[in-house]
Image (cartoon, rainbow, N blue to C red):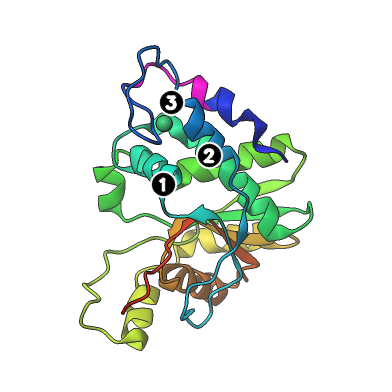
Amino acid sequence: MAPAGIWSDLADLVLPTECAGCRGVRLSLRQGACASCVAELAALRPAPSRPTPAPVGLPGCVALGPYQGVLRETLLSYKERGRHGLARPLGRLLAEVVAEAVGERRPVLLVPVPATARAVRDRHGDHLRRLARQAGLRLRAAGWSVAAAHPLRALPRPDSATLDSAGRAAAAHAAFPARTARVPAARRAAAGRAVVVLDDIVTTGVTLAAVTRSLRDAGIPVYAAAVLAATERRRRG
Ligand SMILES: [Zn+2]
């Protein structure tokens, strides 16, 4: 799947005030992002990404690119600046990541990392779920068999600054309990499908590892994780 349609997706957006990628205002701007930002996004290629150190239980993870530049700005425009129309082009890009993570065309079950009720309220909706829906549409259009499941919920996490890594892992795991009533259907949906956990950004990998563990405990083994951006931690000293 080539990301050739990104331009038209971004160009379809209605009268934004600034480019989603560089925030530059263009006189004739009728599209979501300027040509150079679209070209930069379209040039990104999904690649394996692994935080160092990687938390126990982190599945193989593929990211579209580092969390910087146009990708970072576009994600921020989408999540924090209310540009909900970016779900479509970003979801299309996420579909590329899923395809790379799975390797060959086969039935997949997409499980987006759940959002807390507060995040959904603050952002006027579940931004990752919208991305997952768009990614699923894109994959289906390319001939994939796609299902989605939402068998976990997200609880607010305590401040982890004072916790050691084991404590952080335990807190993260407790933050994603199963929605018991949804687990049987999700388990059936997972049968014969590669389960792919979706997130927008991976930093430490603790969230993806915790979600993977909660899914495994619910009888839903995870095949891989697919994210749009990977934070590259700066080396100290
Ligand atoms: Zn731009």
Pick whichever of labels 1 and 2 is earlier in the sequence.
2
Mark 3 or mark 1, which is nearer to you?
Answer: 1
- Which of the 4 image quarters holds residue 71? top left
Q: Are marks 3 and 2 in contact (CB under 8 Å)?
A: no
Q: Nearer the N terminus, badge 3 or badge 2?
A: 3
Mark 3 lies within 8 Å of ligand 1 (Cβ measured): no
Q: Report how far apart the C-alphas of labels 3 and 1 lie in the structure.
A: 16 Å
Q: How would you rate the neighbour count of disc 2 (Cα within 10 Å): few for under 14, some for 14-19, many for 20 or more?
A: few
Q: Quadrant of the N terminus?
A: top right
- The answer to whether the residues at label 1 and label 2 have Cβ atoms under 8 Å apart is yes
Most common SS among magenta residues: loop
Q: Which residue is mark 1?
A: 69
Q: Residue at x 49, y 79 (%)?
A: 54
**Residue 84 % position (x, y):** 39, 32
Q: Residue farthest to the front?
A: 237
What span is colored magenta in the figure? 10-16
Q: Is residue 212 visible?
A: yes
Q: Secondary structure at mark 1?
A: helix
Question: Quarter holding the C terminus?
Answer: bottom left
Q: CA distance from mark 3 to mark 2?
A: 14 Å
Which of 182/83 is in front? 83
Residue position for label 3 = 32
Q: In the rendered structure, which amino acid carries the disc numbered 2?
A: Glu
- Mark 2 sits on what residue? 40
